[in-house]
Image: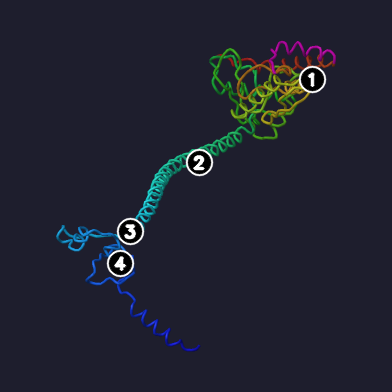
Amino acid sequence: MGALPSSQTQGLTQAKATKAKYPCLRCKKNVTKNSKSVRCGTCQFWVHTECENISAELYSILAHPEKFGGAISWTCESCLASSARIEQTVKAYTDKIREIEARVTGTEDGIRDLGKKMEKMDEKISKKEENVDKKIQKGEKGILEEMREREVRRMNLMIYRVPELDDDRATGMERIEFDKKQCSKIFHAIEVRLKEDDIKFCRRVGERGEESRPLLVGLYSEADKDRVLRYARKLEHTRYKEVAICQDLTKKQRDEELDLKREAEKRNEDLNEEDKAKNLRWAVVGARGEKRLIKTTARDNSNRQDGHQRRGGARGRGGGRTRGEASGGWEEPRQRRERSKPMEESTGMGRDNRRRMRSEDSEDSEDRSPPRKR
């Protein structure tokens, strides 16, 4: 690059030499010690009094602040305008900060409330978990107890309407022996050859009254118990037709069967017109302890109930009458005998049956008599 002309170099030198050390904010001229001037307390720049239209009184106060109580500051118009804008900005930010602080405070309060709610929820959950654990333990305990009770009753039978020994002075052992003999005769009548020694125990259930109490009979073999239940339907054609035999059920099993019966009655009440037209009904079917609910025709239901009746369908360990028709009613033994007469006459079984009953009565007359009074 070429050198600058000498005239331009001299102009730059003079500009540097004339550059003000303390330029006035208004006129940009240098402020000297002898000139009347004041300095802005904000931007620290000087300004001539005549440029800023500062009166002589104000100048004297600013020049000698110690005479008027100490530190006095003056601010130029530019700084005042900037300060106003800054104050507005600061105020706006301050308001925002206060709003944020309020929100933060509200959030903190909400967090504390949420923490308290979570603590309460944890307590509730803990209590519910404890209750659930207790219910699970209780349920498991109940299931185990039910399984144990069913196992205990697995080889037991309930026999209903077996006459009791009519002797107030008879001992407990005499009554047991009498009941065992009656059970053995009943078993032989349905062609199940079980002797008194095959009976593990035999006792009456409930308090003595006018009617014969049910007999709880325990056998040594589950196969023997199943055979008795399978051939119990033959009681219909023996002199023990009023006797009923069924499995020894737990209270839970009896309640379940009763619930099934109630459910069947409820569903039958709510049958739609289509099912009624088809003669369909809900019925409880199956062996004792294995009952289930099915929809069937009224005729099939009646046949199932008749078959159950012939097998001696009595409920649990409680006494009671024999079961009736499909409607779930009851039938007195006398009515049942009258209903069975036409069947005996039509099949020709009545004469042989009565002949066999007479021979059994003659053989068992001594056994059925009460013990000799001492």
Q: Upstream in the sequence, badge 3 or badge 1?
A: 3
* Spatial separation of the CA atoms under disc 2 and disc 3: 81 Å
Badge number at residue 133: 2
Amino acid identity at mark 1: Asn
Residue type marked 4: Phe
**Residue visible at 72% across and 15% down in the picture:** 361
Query: Which callout, 2 or 3, points at the residue further toward the start of the chain?
Result: 3
Name the element at disc 3: helix
**Front-lying residue, 3 or 277:** 3
Q: Dot 4 corresponds to which residue?
A: 45
Whole-angstrom CA distance, mark 4 to mark 2, is 84 Å
Type of the residue with mark 2: Asp
**How is this picture coloured?**
rainbow
Residue matched to label 3: 77
**Which mark's residue is nearer the viewer, 2 or 3?**
3
Highlighted range, magenta:
328-346
> Which circle's residue, 3 or 4, is located before the other in the chain?
4
373 within the magenta span = no
Q: Which residue is mark 1?
A: 279
- Residue 171: name its quadrant: top right
State the image coordinates of residue 190 (x, y, percent, origin top left): 74, 24
Determine whether 153 is above or below 328 in the image: below
Dot 1 or dot 2: first in sequence order is 2
Instruction: Give the camera-side residue of 297 and 172.
Output: 297
Q: Is residue 32 visible?
A: yes
